[in-house]
Amino acid sequence: MFVTSHQDYYFIVMTQSFRFAHVSDIHLPTFAKDCANPALMLNKRFFSALSWFGKRRFIHDKAVTDHLISDMQTSQVDHVLVTGDLVNLSLPDEYTRAAHWLSTLGTPESVSAIPGNHDRMRDSALTRTGLDAYAAYMSGDDPDHEARFPYVKRRQDVLMIGLSSSIATPVGWCSGRLGEAQRERLRDILSQAQKENLCRIVALHHPPAGPQKPHKGLEDHQQLADIIAQTGAELILHGHTHQSSMHALPGPQGPVPVMGVASLSVRPDKGYQPGCWHEYTITRRDQTWDIALDVHRFAGFNAPTKRVAQALLSHG
């Protein structure tokens, strides 16, 4: 098993570490004025708007998001990874606010983002233009690369690999798919990084492991699992489920941790996991990697975040 007591972490001789934050499913507030154009609402957005204004706006609270981001920034992590669903309805003003929100976290050199299903509610020119508002955060070290995804950012000996599983789906569905072209590029990236002994962090919105419901899951999760079984990876991160979770996929040298993070913005009194962010510390140990996890969970506006879980995900 790849999880050991976090207590053991302090008895390992470490080299220089790389620390990053994982946040997801921010669901920045949507306002009635965003929905004023009927031409934009006579589709799936109409039903999603009913959900937002009827229920979800009382679950997601930007004040919780701001509190947790303040805590994260106090921790002075080296990088921030955002795994999708910044917005709710894929509307123009939502994209503008999301781009501004990303800019408050840092520059594209220190912040990486990928889209979720709410960021691409429809496959349209409006959606593509909207996502371009934060394209700089969804690009790698080679921003002129022909294919936007997967993108790659190398920081120290850590490779951040951003995938897009966001696709347009029918009403009542929020599933995702990578597609063959993206999967094959991922295979090449993972194989080359393995030869260079880099720590490979794969990020996507939909969970590639654990229970898979057809209308909510990753449609090509088995094909992705086959790639991981052949090439391996050190860590796979996702959002979408609004739960902090731990699963694994088989890799050539042992199980690969698959970690989900709860929504950043959920209030603690709504029957769901309260908002949280995950802090990862990656350290090379000879030819292997130690990956330590701290879960920071919202504990009230007048209290610091509560570290509710600590683990060491050793891989290699």
Image (cartoon, rainbow, N blue to C red):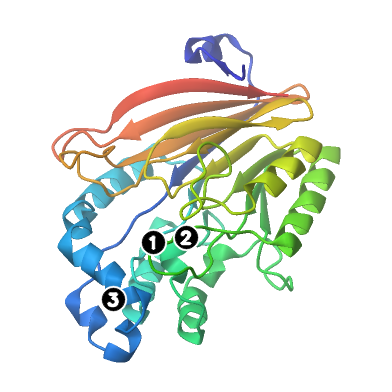
Please report contact status of discs 3 and 1: CB closer than 8 Å, yes or no.
no
Residue 140 x %, y %:
65, 61
Residue 295 higher or lower than 118, as above or below? above
Whether residue 282 sits left or right of residue 64 in the image: it is right
Residue for badge 3:
46
Q: Quadrant of residue 288?
A: top right
Which quadrant of the figure contains the N terminus? top right
Residue 72 x %, y %:
36, 42
Element type where label 2 sits in the image? loop
- The amino acid type found where label 2 is placed reads Gly
Residue for badge 1:
86
Q: First in sequence, mark 1 or 2: give its number.
A: 1
Q: Which mark is residue 167?
A: none
Residue 152 higher or lower than 243, as above or below? below
Name the mark nearer the viewer: 2 or 3. 3
Element type where label 1 sits in the image? loop
- What distance separates the C-alpha of mark 1 from that of mark 2? 8 Å
Residue at horizontal 57 percent and vertical 58 percent from the top = 109
Residue at horizontal 25 percent and vertical 39 percent from the top = 272
